[in-house]
Image: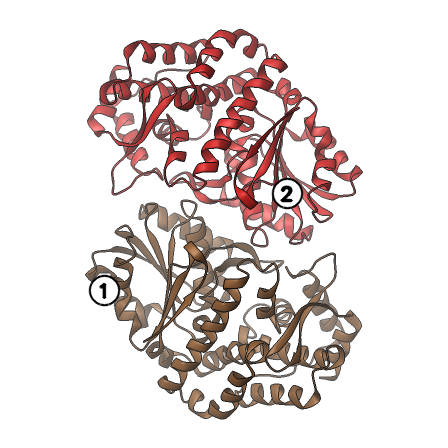
Chain colours: A red, B brown
């Protein structure tokens, strides 16, 4: 088992990475001094595979969990499901020391986390991420929330979990497309923070795609450690934490204009990262050879690296990017790369250049 | 003008108490370094009286405020209006440095505050409380949220305002019943924290009921100072802050079983405080003469001090109290008085005694 600690003082917590971690859920929660009543939030894909084991582990440790199942897919990240979830939590009569377990991918983690952030003004949250993307990214760092029609993640909170359990064995249950989507966030850590990780991904990609648990354990732990370091320095994204959004400005825009669901998040940000690498070549001296390595690694991982848009679609994409939370004074800001492992944030990019990169890509 | 500072470190803020404070809104916001786009949330009673002045003050200071008007009454504290409010904020394209002004009573402050706590994961909040109750209580301290069918304030957050502006002149616009309701929270501060304040209220009640602005200025400032002191020591209610709930366990229960709206909040907690005083006589040595002073002051202020319930209603009231957030391990905990100005919290009270006090009152 590997343990990564997120250094946030009294809000600090551990990420445990191990094969079979799900079986420890009840015992680990028991050590946190929480109330008996609790809830497991999961989705309709994960529930038949893993809910019974999670409920049994909690029951064996003396807890009384309610099970809340939401429909699989991005549609569950809505204020409608937020409302239904609160009604279900109230019906189970949770108390202030109760807790919520998020058992699933990023959507479940974001919805369950936002429920935990706001039920009775804040309950303890245990993240049990079951996708690669959630294990290396969304379960760590405390960003929780839901989407509006107007855009993604426009409503939410910062609410750190008390514990994150990453079970490598459950990654075997992931559909191929979803596993590859998770690799887009893994590759991102190499680009923004760790050139050695990037080189390792280039080297070990075959074993990773075969879901070799030893290789994955090391990589998940390294990604979590990077995220923990960044979040530990800037919990609420007043500065450094913005680097985690590399590729996300265009990626979120693509998700918005294509209707959440056409692209998986990892697919959208793969396109966004390659586009950001090209913008970096124009603006921050990212050399063409490294731009090519970036595009090639995403392609080898089976991820899209370009998108064909009509002029009208490009217009809608730029409008969607202006709706993004990261806008300040009406300007769109980007994270751009200087070299592999080093990025700068808050870079203003002329809309015409964004359009040009999207046209020629 | 009087200024009370809430001592919460980097989340600390000032409460400004003055006649005509509303006219300063724009200029005071300009000093906080916020973005141009902002929103004023108010209700259908307050909007015709005060929205134009608030919008004009913000506009004159260079801001671009959107106006969001919700229906007057407790019904606006719902996830439905929360959802609509977020859609309206998104349509105005607020940015991370944007802010929300809560212009109204406790309902508006709680809803607007919860919108601010969660839009783009947290925007600055300016409280401009327009009722006595909101000025001395709900606008200060950062508790925001909405109700569920299952109970009051079950969904919410802690989100401190950046500034609170209490305009004493606007209290003239309050209906008599609502003004008297606010006095229930004022009297509470005397009971829980300041016997001299209690004696002053006994002495000056006639001037207070005539809404003498000089007398009110001193009293509002003293109540805010007590709340600031308590919140400064225990922001998220892990201990001391619980004393602010004196009378609220029964009060919230009454509001829940009678449908929010029959009793104004202040009326419900007046009944709750008199009942808590009687429980205190049984359990914590609160002397009968002081119980009588408590009941008499509420009565002189025109507030209800007793309630006639059927056996079935008493049963529903006890059930509603068990649904309260303050429940821990299934036990109902009360704040009880030792003497005027001094209370203890976390007191377990046998349900039979609660029932007895409610029956004989």
Mark 1 vs mark 2, CA separation in Å: 45 Å
Q: Chain of mark 1?
A: B
Residue A157 relative to residue A330: left or right: right
Q: Position of residue B333 (x, y in %)?
A: 70, 66
Secondary structure beneath disc 1? helix
Discs 1/2, front = 2
| Number of numbered labels in the structure image | 2
Residue at 43 percent across and 77 percent down: it is B220
Residue A175's disc is none
Near-viewer residue (A21 or A68): A21
As drawn, B202 above or below B58: below
Query: Left or right of B65: which side holds B184?
Result: right
Q: Quadrant of residue B95?
A: top left
Q: Secondary structure at mark 2?
A: strand
Residues B263 and B271: in front is B271
Picture quadrant of residue B214: bottom left
Of residue B246 and residue B344, the one placed in the foreground of this image is: B344
Q: Which residue is mark 1?
A: B56
List x then y, in percent, for residue A313.
29, 26
The answer to whether residue B297 shows anywhere in this view is yes
On the image, the x and y values in percent for residue B179 come to 45, 80
In the picture, which quadrant includes the C terminus of chain A?
top left
Q: Position of residue B211 (x, y in %)?
A: 39, 86
Relative to B307, is A261 above or below?
above
The answer, for residue A301, to whether it is visible in the render is no
Quadrant of the snapshot with the N terminus of chain A: top right
Question: According to the image, label 2 marks what residue?
Answer: A100
């Amino acid at each position: 088992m590997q343990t990564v600690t997120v250094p946030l003082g009294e809000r600090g917590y551990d990420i445990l990475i191990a094969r079979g971690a799900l079986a420890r859920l009840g015992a680990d929660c028991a050590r946190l001094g929480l109330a008996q009543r609790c809830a497991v939030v999961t989705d309709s894909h994960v529930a038949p595979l893993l809910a019974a084991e999670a409920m049994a582990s909690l029951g064996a440790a003396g807890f009384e969990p309610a099970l809340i199942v939401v429909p699989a897919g991005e549609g569950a990240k809505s204020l409608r499901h937020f409302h239904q979830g609160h009604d279900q939590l109230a019906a189970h009569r949770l108390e202030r020391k109760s807790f919520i377990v998020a058992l699933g991918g990023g959507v479940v983690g974001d919805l369950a986390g936002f429920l935990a952030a706001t039920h009775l003004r804040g309950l303890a949250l245990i993240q049990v991420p079951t996708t690669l993307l959630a294990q290396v990214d969304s379960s760590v760092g405390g960003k929780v929330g839901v989407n509006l029609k107007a855009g993604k993640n426009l409503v939410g909170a910062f609410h750190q979990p008390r514990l994150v359990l990453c079970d490598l064995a459950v990654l075997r249950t992931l559909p191929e497309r979803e596993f590859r989507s998770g690799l887009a966030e893994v590759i991102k850590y190499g680009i923004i923070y760790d050139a050695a990780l990037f080189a390792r991904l280039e080297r070990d990609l075959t074993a990773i795609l075969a879901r070799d648990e030893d290789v994955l354990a090391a990589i998940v732990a390294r990604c979590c450690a990077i995220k923990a370091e960044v979040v530990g320095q800037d919990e609420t994204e007043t500065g450094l934490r913005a680097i985690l959004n590399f590729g996300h400005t265009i990626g979120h825009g693509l998700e918005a204009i294509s209707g959440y669901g056409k692209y998986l998040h990892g697919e959208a940000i793969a396109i966004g990262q390659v586009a950001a690498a090209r913008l970096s070549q124009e603006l921050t001296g990212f050399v063409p050879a490294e731009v090519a390595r970036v595009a090639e690694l995403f392609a080898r991982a089976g991820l899209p690296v370009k998108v064909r848009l009509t002029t009208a679609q490009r217009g809608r994409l730029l409008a969607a990017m202006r709706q993004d939370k990261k806008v300040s004074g009406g300007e769109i800001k980007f994270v751009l790369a200087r070299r592999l492992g080093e990025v700068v944030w808050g870079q203003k990019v002329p809309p015409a250049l964004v359009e040009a990169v999207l046209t020629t890509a």
